[in-house]
Image (tube, coloured by chain):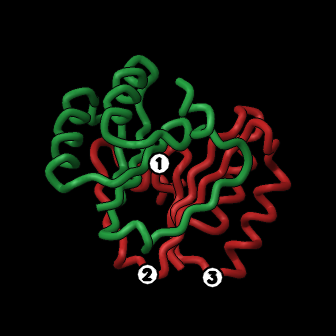
Chain colours: A red, B green
Amino acid sequence: MYVILVYDMATERVAKMLKLCRQYLNWIQNSVFEGELSEVKLQELILKARALMNEDHDSLIIFTSRHERWLDKQIIGNEKNSVDNFL
Amino acid sequence: MYVILVYDMATERVAKMLKLCRQYLNWIQNSVFEGELSEVKLQELILKARALMNEDHDSLIIFTSRHERWLDKQIIGNEKNSVDNFL
């Protein structure tokens, strides 16, 4: 399935969440990721993310769509992704 | 159409973008909004957003889906939206 993930983490936990999400998805903006994941892999990611989060303060929003073609994407302004390829 | 909007703005421009987006969409996290918008209203929002942005530094990502039912959403952790209702 196609996944869009956005997190809002306290500064001290951001680096670990970024690292985790990049193992599963493509980084497209500050705290936004997207990509194709199986249900099993998505559940694995959520489990690991929960272990990093303080659920009283941090937040993780995950949108899923059965097919990527059901979603259109426009990027206006600075595209972080083009930099991300070189990291 | 159903819209998910995420921005990444320099601090000095965040407040104006937040205010603009809240006129069109529901705020669901830090810099994330969602909601139903017509194509015309979306183009109007994009036009106004561009006027606020420095496109070399700021970024705006807009996902659209023809039907809300093509998208599932999970929120893990702190739900900002429940607070937003009282603002």
Question: What secondary structure is marked by label 2?
Answer: loop
Q: Position of residue A28 (x, y in %)?
A: 46, 55
Mark 1 belongs to which subunit?
A
Write down the residue under mark 2.
A67
Along the viewing direction, whichever of B23 and A17 lies nearer the viewer? B23
Write down the residue under mark 3.
A38
Identified by mark 1, the residue type is Gln
Residue A25 picture quarter: bottom right
Along the viewing direction, whichever of B85 and A19 lies nearer the viewer? B85
Measure the alpha-carbon separation of dots 2 and 3: 12 Å
Regarding residue B54, the answer to whether it shows in the image is yes
Identified by mark 3, the residue type is Ser
Dot 3, how many residues are within 10 Å of its Cα: few (below 14), some (14-19), or many (20+)?
few
Dot 1, how many residues are within 10 Å of its Cα: few (below 14), some (14-19), or many (20+)?
many
Tell me which residue sits at (53%, 58%) in the image. A33
2 and 3 marks on the same chain: yes
Write down the residue under mark 1.
A29
Residue A59 picture quarter: top right
Identified by mark 2, the residue type is His
